[in-house]
């Protein structure tokens, strides 16, 4: 409102009350004693009106998108990516759900994993991965030979196509007669937790679990070469409903972040397919 309009409103209020609220002079204006007594009530009322109006009418509409992903994706690669996405898109919130939970879900977008080579050409391909050996920083100095490596307990994840036997055969040839201290666990996050506690070594998959491995203080063991694939992540949308703009925006953001991770290559620490 202009100054003249404000003055009109104040004069109308004084007329309604039947008392002056201000003492007006040529160069200054002061509250009357009654105006001073009335001011706190006016301030409280205006504050209440502003607060209520903001809660009722100024609330931004939030579009919620449900994303389903594997445990490893949800625990490692996705948190920072989704935080950056929501910061850049304040009107969108992503509800991240973990694959395999008991509750029934109907996601808007799913990150799937597959080991078929043709998935690299899938139109919604997200990222591939490389297999590495994860260890603690202090263990790297102890691993200078295959014998040193095999002196550790080796954690295998039950669902993985590439385990310790396949990884060792690929890089060092068959190991007949060697005793491997293999121990099978259910998930990569669990195997990485074991490694962080100094209990052995685990296979990681870059770039997916780089963040969680780095948070645990783990590094890639330089003795074992990085082994490409198999395994690819790709995005999947329900075919029975039209895509909302917010879902398409999230899909593009995930692909851009994945491509950036693949370009960076080796992260500070490992990963996994996380099914």
Image (cartoon, helix red, strand yellow):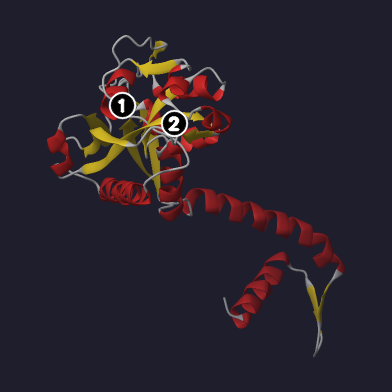
Q: Quick check: can you spot residue 142?
A: yes
Image position, residue 196 (x, y; %): 54, 25
67 vs 2, left or right, is: left
Tag 2 secondary structure = helix
Is 135 rendered above or below residue 261? above
Image position, residue 188 (x, y; %): 40, 23
Q: Quick check: can you spot residue 240?
A: no
Circle 1 crowding by C-alpha within 10 Å: few under 14, some 14–19, many from 20: few
Choose mark 1 or mark 2, whichever is in front.
1
240 vs 9, left or right, is: left
**Which of the 4 quarters of the picture holds residue 30?**
bottom right
Image position, residue 46 (x, y; %): 65, 58
Residue 75's tag is: 2
Please give the name of the residue rendered at 20% of the width and 45% of the height, measured from the top-left corner. 243
Q: Which residue is mark 1?
A: 172
Instruction: Kindly report the distance in space between the C-alpha atoms of the residues bearing marks 1 and 2.
Output: 32 Å
**Which of the 4 quarters of the picture holds residue 181?**
top left
Image position, residue 269 (x, y; %): 46, 37
Circle 2 crowding by C-alpha within 10 Å: few under 14, some 14–19, many from 20: some
Please give the name of the residue rendered at 24% of the width and 46% of the height, measured from the top-left corner. 244
**Which of the 4 quarters of the picture holds residue 14?**
bottom right
Please name whichever residue, 112 or 228, is drawn nearer the observer in this view of the structure.
Answer: 228
Please give the name of the residue rendered at 66% of the width and 55% of the height, measured from the top-left corner. 47
Please name whichever residue, 136 or 242, is drawn nearer the observer in this view of the structure.
Answer: 136
| Of callouts 1 and 2, the N-terminal one | 2
Please name whichever residue, 30 or 77, is drawn nearer the observer in this view of the structure.
Answer: 77
């Amino acid at each position: 409102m202009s100054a003249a309009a404000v003055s009109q409103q104040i004069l109308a209020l004084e007329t309604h009350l039947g008392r002056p609220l201000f003492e007006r002079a040529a160069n200054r204006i002061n509250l009357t004693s009654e105006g001073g007594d009335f001011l706190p009530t006016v301030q409280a009322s205006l504050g209440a009106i502003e607060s209520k109006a903001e809660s009722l009418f100024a609330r931004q509409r939030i579009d919620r998108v449900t994303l389903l992903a594997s445990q490893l994706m949800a625990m490692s690669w996705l948190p920072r990516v989704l935080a950056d996405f929501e910061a850049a898109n304040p009107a969108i919130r992503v509800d991240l759900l973990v694959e395999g939970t008991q509750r029934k879900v109907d996601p808007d977008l799913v990150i799937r994993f597959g080991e078929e080579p043709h998935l690299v050409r899938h139109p919604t391909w997200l990222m591939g991965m490389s297999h590495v050996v994860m260890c603690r920083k202090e263990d790297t100095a102890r691993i200078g030979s295959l014998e040193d490596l095999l002196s550790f307990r080796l954690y295998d994840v039950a669902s993985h196509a590439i385990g310790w036997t396949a990884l060792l055969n690929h890089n060092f040839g068959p190991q007949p007669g060697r005793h491997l201290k293999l121990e099978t666990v259910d998930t990569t996050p669990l195997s990485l937790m074991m490694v962080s506690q100094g209990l052995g070594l685990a296979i990681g998959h870059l770039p997916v679990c780089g963040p969680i491995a780095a948070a645990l203080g783990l590094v890639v063991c330089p003795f074992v070469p990085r082994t490409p694939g198999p395994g690819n992540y790709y995005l999947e949308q329900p075919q029975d409903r039209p895509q909302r703009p917010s879902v398409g925006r999230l899909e593009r953001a995930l692909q851009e972040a994945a491509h950036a991770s693949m370009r960076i290559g080796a992260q500070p620490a490992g990963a996994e397919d996380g099914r």
